[in-house]
Image (cartoon, coloured by chain):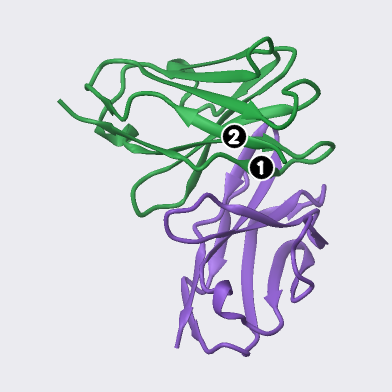
Chain colours: A green, B purple
Amino acid sequence: QVQLQESGPGLVKPSETLSLTCTVSGGSISGYYWSWIRQLPGKGLEWIGYIYYSGSIKYNPSLKSRLTISVDTSKNQFSLKLSSVTAADTAVYYCARIRLGGLDFDYWGQGTLVTVSS
Amino acid sequence: EIVLTQSPGTVSLSPGERATLSCRASQSISNSYLAWYQQKPGQAPRLLIYGVSSRATGIPDRFSGSGSGTDFTLTISRLEPEDFAVYYCQHYDSSLFTFGPGTKVDVK
């Protein structure tokens, strides 16, 4: 059974960089697209971006200028960096796998709350 | 960019009742990339339906999806206690994933 686990600081100061890592277990990161999705407090879901295991990337245009997503196949991990954060970036951040051959998300991490505050 | 709207925002039903949830797209979805998720408080979303009408692995057959063009429906034939949750539709187009705002199904 594939499992995803987000890790990283739960508190980030305004203007700094939010950094999260997603560790995939129970399966290989190879052959799949992997994504980051966030959920603002009490709100709906916002797609952040995805990365293929080989490194090709797509970002949400609304966040693109501040985003970096990378993959480390040797560690079965992929990562998110969001720069110049503000309080509006406070959210639960999820990592997820894009279903093979599909365009939807079949496995999700449990989510991690990141609060932007001084 | 295709915008998804969901209705109703909240629906109050009793266990055993039928739930009909709507997802409407601002433009016709021609590629059938329409999925539905269930989210319970404090949990990640769970994929229920993909490709408009295909159930994901392990999803009970009381969940069904239908629709075409701009109008899509998630139907729960008989609500079980564990089905009270928020439901989101999701689409992919032009390198962008979008989610609807969600419909909350709560207990009447």
Q: Quadrant of the C terminus of chain A?
A: top left
Residue at (62% x, 54% y) in the render: B46
| Label drawn at residue B44 | none
N-term mark: 1 or 2: 2
| Label drawn at residue A4 | 2
x, y percentage for residue A105? Answer: 67, 43
x, y percentage for residue A74? Answer: 68, 9
In the image, B71 versus A92, the foreground residue is: A92
- In the rendered view, does A38 fall on the left or right side of A99? left
Residue at (81% x, 62% y) in the render: B53
Residue at (59% x, 34% y) in the render: A4
| Residue of label 1 | A107
Residue type at tag 2: Leu
In the image, B42 versus A83, the foreground residue is: B42
x, y percentage for residue A107? Answer: 66, 42
Classify A33 as above or below B32. Answer: above
Q: CA distance from mark 1 to mark 2?
A: 7 Å
Residue at (52% x, 49% y) in the render: B44
Chain of the residue where label 1 is placed in the rendered structure: A
Judged from the image, the secondary structure of the residue bearing numbered disc 2 is strand
Most distant residue in the left direction? A118
Mark 1: few/some/many CA within 10 Å (<14, 14-19, 20+): many
- In the rendered view, does A91 fall on the left or right side of A49? left
Q: Quadrant of residue B24?
A: bottom right
- In the rendered view, does B15 fall on the left or right side of A56? left
Residues at circles 1 and 2 in contact by the CB criterion of under 8 Å? yes
x, y percentage for residue B67? Answer: 78, 67
Chain of the residue where label 2 is placed in the rendered structure: A
